[in-house]
């Protein structure tokens, strides 16, 4: 089967790496891909916003499955148009992608289905939103309803800060994403990511992970797309996993089916492990990045078969096997990230770094120019390692980082610290 993978990040490199190991695979195409993905795929220039062009490409290359990495094409309805053209696609429809595309939609669904999440209210008027926020205990959480590139959430420590965040949303700071505001109760606890494949009727749990969102050591500094991750997250015990499936994931799949918008694809639940149990912070309709990288390193089964089973609605007869090993990834970012990253600096030593036992290096923002790898984005590399313990995976990943010769980049030095403390019994 020929496969078209859409995206260009570390998440898509990890997916390409896993898909390329499948005995079912014919040719793998990636649009646009990156120099890492190009090791396994034919990278093509395709405007993914032009659905007719994507369909024409699929017909020309007899693509049996399209795998959509990022959320934006899903929210824009790419999966609907491919499906209507008779092309199999891994990823939810435009309506089902509202689980990520509209926080208000998800909160209403949770309320209806009794899914544990923070108490909330939705507003289209700044005055009403401010009046409501002023009555809430602080911190209070203010969110733009739509997708705001990870910048639409403010944990307001005072009512004045909440009012300012509401004002910023309605004054167009996030464009259409801010036309509605959700005000939420602040939840306390540790965060974890939970992934499940959903075929519209059933959900199959994948694995748990935790990521490090802040740019600096000690989880300090501004938020990023994620500076590192590991899987499994031992804090999500088998009992908690079962509870997440029963109380959060399965009711969501059922509620979506009932609304006539069955969810097909991977569902990524951001969880808060509160003293009252796991609660949903938000959904994403795609794999996490960099969580996908650690998931793919631990998956023993054929990913392509799993993606096809999801699209075909046969997850009830399906199971997955995982390596017992832990996987950990360290993100190397270009200097300046998460502000304005410096582009064009040269990266050397990737081959010797990849020789460290258990290590895979996934590319994110890189480009290949005259045989040289140059930085071409914020998050640039994902140095990923497997190990028997988190400590071993971490040591291997950082040994590989040391072998990378790149003056223009940096990484955190403490990825996995919480898990390592748990491993040591601290
Ligand atoms: P979101 O984009 O909704 O995942 O929010 C981004 C981050 O804000 C989350 O990863 C949490 O760290 C934090 N956050 C969001 N909502 C809440 C909440 N209700 N209580 C506490 N923290 C939250
Ligand atoms: N690592 C967080 C995300 O993919 O949204």
Image: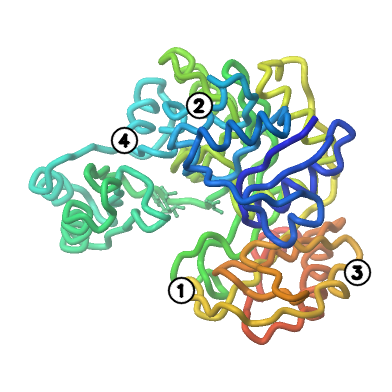
Q: Which residue is mark 4?
A: 104
Q: Earlier in the sequence, mark 4 or mark 2?
A: 2
Between circles 2 and 3, the one closer to the viewer is 2
Numbered disc 2: secondary structure: helix
Numbered disc 4: secondary structure: helix
Numbered disc 1: secondary structure: strand
The Cα–Cα distance between marks 1 and 2, rounded to whole angstroms, is 41 Å
Q: Which residue is mark 2?
A: 81
Between circles 3 and 4, the one closer to the viewer is 3
The Cα–Cα distance between marks 2 and 3, rounded to whole angstroms, is 43 Å
Can the viewer see residue 275?
Answer: no
Q: Is residue 113 left or right of residue 371?
A: left
Q: Earlier in the sequence, mark 1 or mark 2?
A: 2
Q: Which residue is mark 1?
A: 221
Q: Which mark is residue 355?
A: 3
> In the displayed structure, would residue 253 be above or below residue 106?
above
The Cα–Cα distance between marks 4 and 2, rounded to whole angstroms, is 25 Å
**Where, by quadrant of the figure, is residue 75 drawn?**
top left
Classify the position of the C terminus by image quarter. bottom right
The Cα–Cα distance between marks 4 and 1, rounded to whole angstroms, is 28 Å
Residue 333 x/y as whole percent: 60, 72
Q: Is residue 254 left or right of residue 393?
A: left
Q: Residue at x 72, y 44 (%)?
A: 29
Asked whether the beta carbons under mark 4 and mark 2 sit within 8 Å of each other, the answer is no
Q: Residue at x 52, y 60 (%)?
A: 225
Q: Is residue 250 left or right of residue 259?
A: right
Q: Earlier in the sequence, mark 1 or mark 3?
A: 1
Between circles 4 and 2, the one closer to the viewer is 2
Numbered disc 3: secondary structure: loop
């Amino acid at each position: 089967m020929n496969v078209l993978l859409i995206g260009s990040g570390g998440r898509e490199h990890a997916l390409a790496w896993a898909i390329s190991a499948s005995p079912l695979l014919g040719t793998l195409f990636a649009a646009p891909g990156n120099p890492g993905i190009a090791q396994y795929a034919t990278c093509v220039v395709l405007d993914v916003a032009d659905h007719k062009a994507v369909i024409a490409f699929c017909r020309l290359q007899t693509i049996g499955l399209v795998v959509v990495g990022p959320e934006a094409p899903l929210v824009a309805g790419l999966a609907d148009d491919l499906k209507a053209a008779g092309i199999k696609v891994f990823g939810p429809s435009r309506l089902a992608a509202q689980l990520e595309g509209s926080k208000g939609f998800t909160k209403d669904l949770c309320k209806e289905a009794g899914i544990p999440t923070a108490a909330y209210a939705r507003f289209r008027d700044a005055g009403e939103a401010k009046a409501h926020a002023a009555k809430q205990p602080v911190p209070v959480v203010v969110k733009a309803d739509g997708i705001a590139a990870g910048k639409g959430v403010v944990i307001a420590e005072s009512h004045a800060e909440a009012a300012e965040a509401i004002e910023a949303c309605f004054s167009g700071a996030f464009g259409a994403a801010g036309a509605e505001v959700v005000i939420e109760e602040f939840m306390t606890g540790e965060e974890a990511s939970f992934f499940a494949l959903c075929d519209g009727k059933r959900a199959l749990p994948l694995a748990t992970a935790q990521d490090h969102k802040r740019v600096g050591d000690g989880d300090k500094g501004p938020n990023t797309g994620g500076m590192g991750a590991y899987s499994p997250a031992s804090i999500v015990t088998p009992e908690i996993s079962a509870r997440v499936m029963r109380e959060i994931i399965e009711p969501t799949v059922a509620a979506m089916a009932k609304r006539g918008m069955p969810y097909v694809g991977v569902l990524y639940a951001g969880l808060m492990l509160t003293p009252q149990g796991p609660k949903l912070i938000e959904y994403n309709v795609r794999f996490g990045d960099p969580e996908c990288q650690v998931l793919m390193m631990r998956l023993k089964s054929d990913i392509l078969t799993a993606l096809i089973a999801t699209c075909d609605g046969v997850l009830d007869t399906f199971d997955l096997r995982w390596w017992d090993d832990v996987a950990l990834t360290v993100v190397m970012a270009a200097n300046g990230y998460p502000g304005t990253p410096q582009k064009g600096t040269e990266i050397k030593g990737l081959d010797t770094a990849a020789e460290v036992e258990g290590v895979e290096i996934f590319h994110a923002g890189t480009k290949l120019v005259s045989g040289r790898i140059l930085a071409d984005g914020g998050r640039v590399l994902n140095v990923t390692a497997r190990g028997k313990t988190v400590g071993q995976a971490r040591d291997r990943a950082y040994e590989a980082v040391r072998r990378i010769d790149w003056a223009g980049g940096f990484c955190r030095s403490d990825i996995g610290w919480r898990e390592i403390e748990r491993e040591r019994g601290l």
